[in-house]
Structures are given as structure tokens and as C-alpha cells.
Amino acid sequence: MSYDVVPVRAQYPALGDGRAWLDGAAGTQVPQAVIDAVSDAYRSGVSNQGAPFEASVRGTGIVAEARQAVADLVGAPEPRGVVLGPTMTALTYRFAAALAPSWRPGDEIVLTQLDHDANVRPWVQAAERAGVTVRLAQVDPTTGQLPAAGVVDLIGPRTRLVALTAASNLIGTRPDVAAVCSVARAAGAVSYIDGVHHCPHTHVDLATLGADLYATSAYKWTGPHLAAVVAADPAVLEALHPDTLLPSPDTVPERFELGTNPFASLAGLVAAVDHLA
């Protein structure tokens, strides 16, 4: 069966010059539908949320649609578990700061050699401040694989967090996330899964993965430069109380989002999910 790539490429204005972009791991180009959604949002006018006038109502609706779109994309049970933010790195620092206050000296966190530094450094720095031990799972140098057993063996009764990639940004290998998350949950540890290079290439179902928190970046799947961390159960978010401003809402997931949401970009995120669907 042949695949006619011409009409597909035609949906992406950046591909109009005939170039083949070979840096997909660094991000995708965006289709015209996403460009139009962002442009339409700016043309229509939006305002901060919470007011009864049209522009504010429109902004509130865009945020709600974005949460639902991400929830649909990753198989989350409800949009209330979707935290929106500028980048996966920024959100990971946000969650590290929110989780670390419950850690105590003698506790442990488990990280991996396979992960992008965005899923390593925020946790290492939080652990150093809390006096927590960092345990690092090693990659098999002959295969590039991260054996699940190598991660699971590091999980113990004092483990508070297991941070793991679902797909390597460098070599593409995919650990057995479900097996690791199952053991982490049994130990009472939070599992934080970097799905940035996983989500664009497979059907994601949080229930199957078993992850407590799953991070994804829209610009890896034809959307604007935005990210989200999705909680499989909003109760995970309810238990955390990140630093925020006095006028900011204390509800979930809003308490994790700093400042005004980028409404036009979120409209583009919704369009990107619709495009993939």
C-alpha cells in the first residue's frame, strides 16, 4: 500500500520549500490548522479568566478545552488532572519544589541514566536541599536499554519518587514503565514519567502505564511551545501545595499554574490534538 505524502506535507506551511526536516526529536513543524487557531484567538480577543464579559468567558473556555484535549490525548480520566505550563522543564521544577517538602533525610529518590537532564537535574537539586539520597539506574551500554529490573532493584521502603523517561530523546529506547510504576506504587513512591518523546509516537493510556504524573510537550506533536503534566488521579495534586501568589486560586489544577495562561497558544494546542485525531 502506497502512502501519498504530498497532501500531508501540504498541511504544513513550513514544508512548502521542499526541505525535509530531520530534527523531529527537537520539535515538529505546525500545520495550518494550528496557525489558524492561534491567529483566530488573537483576532477574537481574550482576557484574563473569571469575569462575566465575552473575552474573559472566551479565555476560560479555551483553557477548559485545552485541559480536555490533553486528557483525551493521554487517556487521563478527567481534565482536572491536567496542569498546563510553558515547558516540561519548568513544570518539572515546579513539581520538584512541591514534592520535596515532604522528603526527609534518609529518604531516597530513583532517577535514571537514560533520562534527559530535564527529568534529572530538578530532582537532584531538590534532593540536595532536602538531604535525600539519589539512586541512579544505569543503562546497558551494549543495547542502550534501561532494564526495568535495574530500576526496580533501587526502589525500597524509603523511596519517595521514581522519575523515568518513557522514551529516550537520544536513542529512542523505551523502558518498561508499567513494571516500574507498579513497584513504585507498592512502595508508596510517586512516579513521574517524562513522556515528551513517548507521546508523539504511540497511543498513550495512563491507566496502562500506571504513572502518577506524566509530562508531555505540545511542540513535539505539532502544537505550540507549551507543556502539560497530567495526574492520573487529581488526588495526587490535591495533596501538594506549591508556592503561589495570594490572588492565585488554590484549586486543582490551577494552583500549579503561575500567572496568566497563554490563551492563544492553548487554542493552538487544542487544534493540534484535533489535527492528530
Image (cartoon, helix red, strand yellow):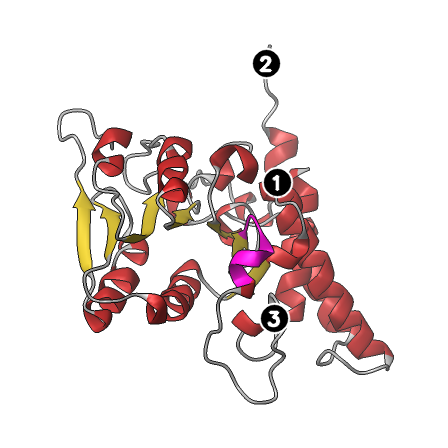
Residue 168 in view here: yes
View extreme (right): residue? 53
- x then y, percent, for residue 196: 43, 47
Of the two numbered discs 1 and 2 on the same chain, state the one appearing first in sequence: 2
Q: Amino acid at mark 2?
A: Ser
Give the labeled residue for mark 3. 254
- The three-letter code of the residue at mark 3 reads Glu
Q: Residues within 10 Å of mark 2 (few under 14, many from 20)?
A: few
Compare residues 88 and 177 and report the one nearer the observer. 177
Say whether marks 1 and 2 touch (CB < 8 Å).
Answer: no
Q: In this view of the protein, which residue sits in the foreground, 2 or 159?
A: 159
Quarter occupied by residue 64: bottom right
- Residue beneath disc 2: 2
Give the residue displayed 39% in from the left and 40% down from the top.
186
Locate residue 206: give its quadrant.
Answer: top right
Name which of mark 3 and mark 2 comes first in the sequence. 2
**Residue closest to the eye, 48 or 108:** 108
> Which residues fall within the magenta stretch?
231-237
Residue at 70% x, 81% y is 48
Asked if the residues shown at circle 3 and circle 2 are in contact, with their CB atoms under 8 angstroms apart, the answer is no
Measured Cα–Cα span from mark 1 to mark 2: 31 Å
Q: Quadrant of the N terminus?
A: top right
Give the image quarter of residue 248.
bottom right
Q: Is residue 174 magenta?
A: no
Assign a secondary structure to mark 3: helix
| Label placed on residue 75 | 1
